[in-house]
Each structure stands twice: as structure tokens, then as C-alpha cells.
Amino acid sequence: MDGPGCTAVIGLQWGDEGKGKLVDLLSHEHDVVVRYNGGANAGHTVVVGGERFALHLVPSGILAGGVKTVIGNGVVVDPARLLEEIGALASRGVDVDGRLWVSDRAHVVLDYHKSEDGLREELLRTGLAGERVGVGTSQEIGTTLRGIGPCYADKVTRATGVRMGDLLRPDVLRRKVELACRLKRALFEGLASSAHVDWDRFDADEVVRVALERGERLRGMITDTVYLLHESLGSGARVLFEGANATLLDVDHGTYPFVTSSNSSVLGIGPGTGVPGHRVGRVVGVLKAYSTRVGGGPMPTELEDATGERIRERGREYGTTTGRPRRVGWLDLVALRYACMINGVTELAVMLLDVLAGFETLRVCTGYRVGGRVTDRFVPDAADLGRVEPVYEDLPGFGEEITSVTTREGLPEGAASYLEKIEGFLGVPVRVVSVGPDRSQTIRVSSDGGAS
Ligand code: GDP
Ligand code: IMO
Ligand code: MG
């Protein structure tokens, strides 16, 4: 059974495109929603009837009654955060019992991974001897400090990688944690940047004790999700794959090294779930109507002026996970066309279009100038991307607020032509236009172009 009923929702930029809202919306048309990559670095906001939910590890599908949710093997799970999130959902009437499953093969983020994340960032900021490096020469990635990189590093290093199933196997857990603590102490003790480290986090007895206790609380959810997913598919379930982070943060295809540590494009679905990617027939590429980025790394269309500030304030562009102000820029169609190619996007969802109301002119980047020549090819390597100059096309803006518009035909001319430009350049139809954070503030466009 190939999956015409299987859908992927994937961010096409540097994250925070509004994937959570879209997954919530599409969940009602699916039976299972699966996370396949990343961890609590993700922050997905869903607003239902004015009530705001921020999800980090639990798939956004949890808010759609009747839908099963799965945290696949490609995710790195911080049990403390997962338990916290489950508790917070329960206190607001969202019961996850019998609706949330966690792969026994998903790797576990332990407290030492978070310390290590901070240590590495400090090291990149200050250099080996703790000296302040020159302005602009810092290599800091600007991670979310959720332990993501160190946890994935242990996964591929192998002997020290702890998996969710190990939380239920004390002997295996102890062996791995003891080795990890010994190795990590040897690596980090003596570094200037380790002066403020809480070494208790590298104490194997304590790490094991806490991990076993958390594992016990999650025992009923930990299972072989590969079989669970294939059995669901076999009985005709429609599965939605919820991408976290986004294409330009993909460790292989993003703006390396300013990326996250997993395959956060659609290409991560196979390894991250055990379901072959070809089963996904529908790939919804999610973009916001402009660009944002959190943390370090190049963003060719970045606006460090009053226009950028105005977009940031209108879009409330502050991180869901870390609260950091997001960097803001004009829409980059060159980067988006690359992202559509990588993901095999079959339809687009354009989010936060309402934020652009009130601008007389809207700029879109249609090429990069590199060494005197203009190219329409994206250059994912960060060092190269940092040297390109955006080539812009100016489009007419729209004055009116659009937060109550319910059909594509009801959009003002400037908004309509902006969408047409996106469709034309990317060669992919727009099927969803979002004009506000609430579930209800959504325009759906059927394949014949009308509202559905
Ligand atoms: P995600 O990580 O891709 O799920 O996106 P985030 O939730 O981190 O960031 C998107 C933000 O935009 C959230 O605060 C959403 O509530 C909000 N949002 C989503 N769609 C719209 C929209 O169409 N208009 C406005 N103004 N906000 C939106
Ligand atoms: P959602 O799912 C925005 C960024 C971080 C940092 C880099 C590496 O909400 O779209 P990490 O902690 O993963 O090692 O950080 O990746 N980053 C995100 N930025 N949205 C996200 O997720 C992100 N996940 C990671 O800011 O620059
Ligand atoms: Mg987010």
C-alpha cells in the first residue's frame, strides 16, 4: 500500500514557519501524527479558540481528538521535558493516555548533554584558553541549549548512546552512562569554559538513578514504533509526518555548520521512523511570508533596520523555545526553490501573510549576486552563503488588514499577486494561506483554485 493518505509537513526556511498550526489543522484528516527528527529544540505553537499551546516534543497532532501520536526513533527525547509537557497538557484537559507512543530506539537527552551543549557553545565563543575572540570571528552556533548536538553525537559515536528502551534495562543503561561520564569528564575537565559546570550532571550514579525514575514513569508509552507504524499503515491509517526544525537547518542540506544535528528536511522521514519515504505522497511545504532565523549563520535577505523591526513586532517574532528575538528578512525565493527541490514539495502553505499588511512595497529575493555574476542557485555552505548579495524584485504591498479574510478571492490585490509570484517562481501551488495564529484564521484553496 503506497500512501496517498500519507502526508509530510515540512518547514522550508530556518524554522518557525507555522508548522504547528498546519499540523494541527491537517491532523483532523489523519489517524496518526509522527515526529521523526529533532527534539525539544522545536517549539510549535498552536492556537485553538484563543487558547495557546506550545509543544516541543509531543507531536502537534495531540490537540486533535482521536488522533494517535508517535515520537519516532529519529527524535532525541529529553524525558524530563517530555514528562513536563505531558503534565502541562493534562492540566489543560488534553489526555495523552493511549494516544502517545515513544520509540524504544529514540535516543535519550541526559542532563550532561545539556551541560555539554553549553560548554561547546562557550568554547566556540571564547576559544580554548577562555580568551575573548575578535568580534565577528565567533564560531558560536547559537543553539537552543537543549542538548541536541551532543545527544546525536553520542548516537553516531555508538557506545555511549542511550536509547529510550535502555531506561527500562538498568544494566545496559549503567554500562553506557558510566562510559559516557568517564569520557566526557576527561574531555572537558581543565577547559577554561568548564569553570561553571555542574559536575554532578556527569556523576554516573546520579544520572542512572534519575534516568531510571523517569523511564519508569514513561514505561507504558515506550514501544517498537516501527512495527506500530507499519501495522497502522497496513490497516489503512493515514499518517502525517510532522517535521521539526526545517530544511535550511538540515545537517546535510542546510546552511552547515549553522544547522541542527538531524535531517530536518523530508529526507529524515525514512531513517527517523522506519517507514520508507516513498510512502509519502503529499508533501506540504510550509513557509512564512518573509524570512526569519534564530541563532547564528547567514541569512542573505536579513533586515537590520526599522522595516525588520516592524515585521518582528507585527509577527511577534520571539522564539517559542528560547524567547530570543528572531532575525527577520524579506522572502528568499532562491532558498525556497532549493527547499522545494530537496523535499519534493507538492503543495505550499503560506503562513503569517497578515504580518505584511501595511507595507507599501514588498521585496522578494529572486537571485544572488556572487562575484559580479547573478545566479538563481542556492549555496547552502554557510561560508559561501555569507558572501552572496541578494537581488530583489519589488512588488506592490497591501494596506488593509487581512486577518478576517476567509477566501483567496477576498484577499486584496497586493496579497493575491504576492501569492502568485511565489507560486510562479516555485512552480508549486498554494493550498493554504494563513492570516492569523488561530485555527480559524486559515484560507484553504482547493485544486481548482476555489476556497474549500
Ligand atoms: P513552528 O515552529 O513552525 O511550529 O512555528 P512557531 O510556532 O515556532 O512560530 C510560528 C508563530 O506564528 C507562532 O507564534 C504561531 O502562533 C504564529 N502564527 C502561525 N500562523 C500565523 C499567521 O498566519 N499569522 C500570524 N500573525 N501568526 C501566525
Ligand atoms: P521549530 O521546529 C528555529 C536552530 C537554533 C540554532 C540551530 C542549532 O520550532 O521550527 P540546536 O539546538 O538544534 O542544536 O540549534 O538550529 N533551531 C531552530 N530555529 N526553529 C526551530 O525549530 C529550531 N530548531 C533548531 O536556533 O540556530
Ligand atoms: Mg518553532
Image (spheres, grey):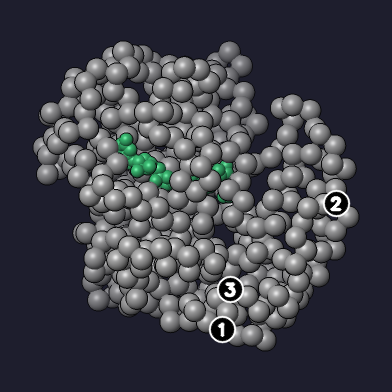
Q: Residues within 10 Å of mark 3 (few under 14, many from 20)?
A: many
Task: Determine which residue is flagged by label 3.
Answer: 163
**Separation of disc 1 and disc 2 at Cα?**
34 Å
The reply to whether residue 58 is visible in this rendering is: yes
Task: Determine which residue is flagged by label 1.
Answer: 168
Percent x, y of residue 82: 48, 66
Q: What secondary structure is marked by label 3? A: loop
Mark 1 or 2, nearer chain start: 1
Observer-nearest of 89 and 302:
89
Mark 1 or 3, nearer chain start: 3
Q: What secondary structure is marked by label 2? A: loop
**Separation of disc 3 and disc 2 at Cα?**
29 Å
**Separation of disc 1 and disc 3 at Cα?**
10 Å
Q: Which mark is residue 63?
A: none
Q: Residue at x 35, y 53 (%)?
A: 53
Mark 3 or 2, nearer chain start: 3
335 sits left or right of 69 in the view: right
Observer-nearest of 77 and 227:
77
Q: Residue at x 19, y 45 (%)?
A: 440
